[in-house]
Image: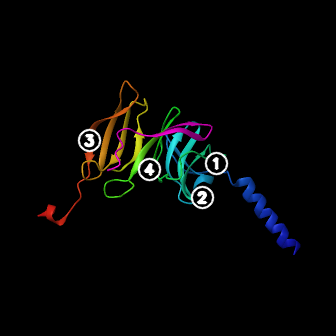
């Protein structure tokens, strides 16, 4: 019995002491990739984005996907995305955060499409959330990616009838306006091969 208790205590102590340990997977002259507590001790951690001194990422939990932050030592849940949050990447520029959420209004067909929202992130909380002006309820918008200078963004949308990348530019009023269609996904069909 003593041996079983001692083994249990040692196992717990090892887990507690080494749960934040990182393991080097591969290293080159310009990059090092580690397996960390984020990838080992949680399920479905996806869409990592560099934020401050760590990563902002999406993770599956008891209530569905949520945004989290980790500095590779601590993990914190990002609050303020709302109950309609949809898994997907978040884009961050300074204290601005862009993320996916179901629209609160339905399309003419009764669908609640995915919309893009902007918020302010401070102390791991998102406030001042608003749906972006160009985001129409008739279409889906997701997977934002913002440029390093914060003046350009790319999103995935189905505005052209099929999913494609839509470029956006920030105007003088600090609003996002459509710039150009960057890529339209052409689906392969047997008719196309003839």
Could you tell me residue 52's position as x and y percent? 57, 36
Q: For numbered disc 4, what is the local secondary structure?
A: loop
Q: Are marks 1 and 4 in contact (CB under 8 Å)?
A: no
Check contact, mark 1 vs mark 2: CB within 8 A: yes
Asked whether residue 176 is drawn in magenta, I would say: no
The residue labelled by disc 1 is 75
Image point (63%, 50%), residue name: 22
- Left/right placement of residue 114 relative to residue 31 reads left
Picture coordinates of residue 91 (x, y %)? 46, 41
Q: From mark 1 to mark 3, how far is it between C-alphas?
A: 37 Å
Could you say whether the residue bearing mark 2 is in a helix, strand or loop?
A: loop
Sequence-wise, the earlier of marks 2 and 3 is 2
In-image side of 9 versus 167 (left or right): right
Frontmost of labels 4 and 3 is 4
Given residues 125 and 55, the one toward you in this image is: 125
Classify 151 as above or below 118.
Answer: above
Tell which residue pokes out farthest to the left in this image. Answer: 194
| Front residue of this view, candidates 139 and 70 | 139
For disc 2, the marked residue is 42
- The disc, 4 or 3, on the residue closer to the chain's N-terminal end is 4
User: Is 98 above or below relative to 12?
Assistant: above
Q: How is the image coloured?
A: rainbow
Q: Residues within 10 Å of mark 4 (few under 14, many from 20)?
A: few
Q: Which residues are magenta?
A: 119-138
> Disc number at residue 104?
4
In the picture of the structure, the residue carrying the numbered disc 3 is 181
| Label 3 residue SS | strand
**Which class describes the residues within 10 Å of circle 2: few (<14), some (14-19), or many (20+)?**
few
């Amino acid at each position: 019995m003593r041996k079983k208790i001692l083994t249990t205590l040692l196992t717990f102590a090892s887990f507690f002491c080494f749960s934040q340990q990182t393991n080097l997977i591969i290293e080159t002259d310009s990059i090092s990739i580690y397996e960390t507590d984020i990838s080992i001790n949680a399920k479905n951690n996806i869409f990592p984005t560099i934020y401050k001194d760590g990563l902002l990422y999406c993770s599956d939990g008891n209530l569905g996907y949520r945004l989290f932050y980790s500095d590779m030592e601590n993990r914190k849940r990002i609050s303020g995305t709302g109950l309609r949050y949809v898994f997907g990447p978040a884009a961050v520029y300074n204290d601005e955060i862009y993320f996916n959420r179901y629209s609160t209004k339905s399309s003419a067909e009764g669908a609640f499409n995915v919309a893009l929202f902007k918020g302010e992130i401070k102390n791991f909380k998102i406030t001042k959330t608003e749906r972006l002006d160009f985001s129409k309820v008739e279409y889906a918008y997701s997977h934002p990616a913002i440029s390093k200078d914060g003046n350009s963004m790319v999103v995935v949308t189905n505005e052209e009838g099929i999913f494609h990348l839509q470029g956006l530019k920030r105007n003088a009023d600090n609003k996002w306006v459509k710039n150009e269609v960057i890529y339209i996904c052409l689906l392969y069909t047997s008719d196309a091969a003839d």
